[in-house]
Amino acid sequence: MNKRIILVSVLVASALSTSAQPGIDEINQAKQQLSSTFFSALDCSLVLAGIFGILGAVRIYHNWQMGHPRIDQAVAGWFFAAIFMILAGGFLQALFGI
C-alpha cells in the first residue's frame, strides 16, 4: 500500500512538472510582436529600394548628360542595390516565417 502511494505521488509530480512549460506564453507574445512590427520593416525595405532606384536614376542621368563614358558600372551598382533591398525583405519574411 505504501509503495502505491509513493508511485502515485511520483507520477502526479512528474505530470505536473511536464505540463508547466515555462516560457510558452512569452514565446507566443514575442512572435506576435515580431509579426506586428515586421511588416513595417518590409515596407521600409521597399521604400529604401525605391529611394535607391530614384537616386540612382537621377545620378546616372546626370552623368550621362555630362558625357561620362563609363556609366555601366553605376547602372549595375544602383540596380543591384535596389534589388538587394527587395530581396532582403523577402528573405527576412521567409526566415521568420511570417
Image (spheres, grey):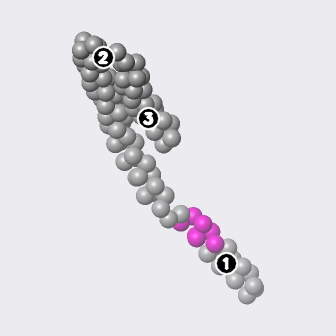
Please report the bounds of the magenta region as a residue range: 14-20
Q: Which residue is mark 2?
A: 68
Q: Earlier in the sequence, mark 1 or mark 3?
A: 1
Q: Position of residue 90 (x, y in %)?
A: 46, 32
Q: Position of residue 89 (x, y in %)?
A: 42, 34
Q: Which mark is residue 10?
A: 1
Which residue is pictured at 60% across the width and 66% down the height?
18
Whether 17 is among the magenta residues is: yes
Tell me the kind of residue under disc 2: His
Name the foreground residue: 65 vs 47: 65
Q: Nearer the viewer, mark 2 or mark 1?
A: 2
Instruction: Bin the neighbour count of mark 1 within 10 Å (Cα to Cα): few under 14, some 14-19, many 20 and up.
Output: few
Name the foreground residue: 54 vs 73: 73
Q: Are marks 3 and 2 in contact (CB under 8 Å)?
A: no
Q: Secondary structure at mark 1?
A: helix
Q: Secondary structure at mark 3?
A: helix
Which residue is pictured at 35% across the width and 33% down the height?
45
Whether 60 is among the magenta residues is: no
Q: Is residue 51 left or right of residue 14?
A: left
Tell me the kind of residue under disc 3: Ala
Q: Which residue is mark 3?
A: 88
Q: Quadrant of residue 76?
A: top left
Q: Position of residue 85 (x, y in %)?
A: 39, 32
Question: Against 61, is 31 above or below?
Answer: below
Question: Against 25, is 10 above or below?
Answer: below
Q: Are marks 2 and 1 in contact (CB under 8 Å)?
A: no
